[in-house]
Image (cartoon, grey):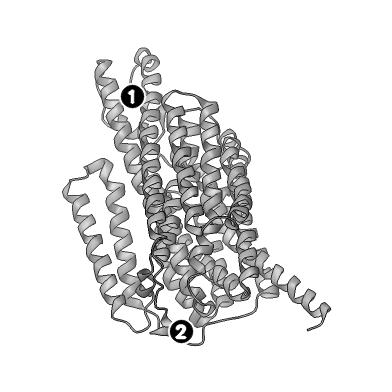
Amino acid sequence: MSTATIALDHRHLNRVLLVASTGCALTVIDTNIVGVMLPTIAKGLHASFADMEWVIGAYVLSFSSLLLPAGSLADKFGRRRLFLGGILLFALASLACGMATSVLALNIARAVQGIGSAFLLAPALAIIAHSFRDTQARNRAWAIWGGVMGLTMVLAPLAGGMISTLLGWRWTFFVNIPICALLMLAVTRHIEESRHEHAGKLDLPGIALFIAGMFCLTWALILAPQHGWLSREVVGRLCLGALWFGLFIRVESGKSRPMLNLQLFRSFPFIGAVLAMFAYAATAQVMTSLLPLLLQNVEGMTPLMAGAGMLPFALAMLLFPVVARWLGKRLHAATLLALGLVTVSFGNMVIATAVFHHHLLLSLAGMSILGSGGGLLNGETQKAIMATVPPQQAGMASGISTTARFSGILLGFATLGAILAASTQWHLQSAMLNAQLPLQPGFSAQVIAGDFSHALAMYDAANQVSLQPLVITSYADGFASMLLCAAAFALFSAIVVLYSARHTRQPTTLSQR
């Protein structure tokens, strides 16, 4: 091959990487912008905290539930074709989100948007894995991909704040439409079609069971603060979710070409990498939606100020994938993953301490530490998982990887949101009892939703003055308790990842069965 041909091929691969990474970034932009806008949306649509959880949950539920089948569909029917279809559906759903006049309409549109994201992201990741066959080139590609994701996380909160200030929350969704149009044009020009020639049939029972299990589990977590963890509504949905997941495993284990190759989970290092991805998403990446609540509801920032306040977190997420690449040459993969999780745990603990003591500068320092841990993990978790399967199974690997990531965001947001709601309610009830003030119906729900003005309006002017610091302190204490729980899970996951590295038994891939 001539030098000119090699250079041309290199430029083509760079364009492929840029287009596919932009597609992945589009889903991250949407999630992060909406996270900054949640308090504004809540006030605009008079929504409860549970409603706001579904704004995130409906999107991520559809997203995470369909990533595995999306990977299989990409392998079977063509990655480029599914990529284009996902972009189109995402654009149409974004239009519906921006036009929504009720919380129900918004959440339905968000669910459809999540479907479009799944059919966008899974083939994009598979295109990258398929295009870069050489190990060194693939590692470089994933490093660049991680940098694009980090840059996206820097820009998204600022963009969300500016959109909220200048145009209103509906433009959070409308802005996706021209981006999608340009992306579709780039895909048609630079991405060639590819598929897995021996891909199996679409696993409809597996898809249905996985979606049912995720839906029941998410629903239970969102209902828990309102009905209680041991209530019939919550326990029933948890049991039903466990049943669906059990049936999903049974169905998949009996198939010769399953949607999810359970043989992969016989490898302890693979399990450790998947857990690291899940824990990273559930304790670090999810904070792009939760930390803006802290900055706006406790620190009293506007959406634009909150977007700027997220910069320490976002900049660290952008810079530390470069540090991870340097460390990756000197540390075992599991050691690097564990180091990232320990850093995430420490960052959450620092922010919790700062919130308890009402110290904004320490909170910002903690966000920087948290983002550093997330940056160490972002590209390395993806690389660790994708490295375990051959290129022809890139669709399945991307499905497992992204399902772990977005299941972590979904379950992390629902679980941490439930802890935030329950802890805030407990602190608020104690504070009201000590102040000898009656607890008005709906007061706690408004406080948990972050709508302090409507909550305080339930009392006369004299009591509002004394209630306001109690409300803010109760919410802050609840938030700090939530952060400590996130820190504990990240630390536990780091220990498991290190333990998994001691076992090197390799999985049996589909091609070996």
| Near-viewer residue (150 or 319) | 319
Tell me which corner region of the image, top left, top right, bottom left or bottom right, holds residue 205: bottom left
Classify mark 2: helix, strand or loop: loop
Q: Earlier in the sequence, mark 2 or mark 1?
A: 2
Can I make out residue 466 in this image?
Answer: yes
Placement of 336 over or under 342, stated as above or below: below
Give the amino acid type for the residue marked by disc 2 in the picture: Ala
Classify mark 1: helix, strand or loop: loop
**Residue found at the very far top of the displayed protein:** 462
Q: Position of residue 315 (x, y in %)?
A: 62, 43
| Near-viewer residue (266 or 278) | 266
Q: Which residue is mark 2?
A: 199
Q: Position of residue 169 (x, y in %)?
A: 54, 44
Give the amino acid type for the residue marked by disc 1 in the picture: Met
Q: Position of residue 365 (x, y in %)?
A: 55, 33
Placement of 465 over or under 316, stated as above or below: above
Of the two numbered discs 2 and 1 in the rendering, the one whose residue sits closer to the viewer: 2
Q: Which residue is mark 1?
A: 458
Q: Residue at x 34, y 16 (%)?
A: 460
**Residue found at the very far bottom of the displayed protein:** 198
Q: Residue at x 54, y 77 (%)?
A: 391
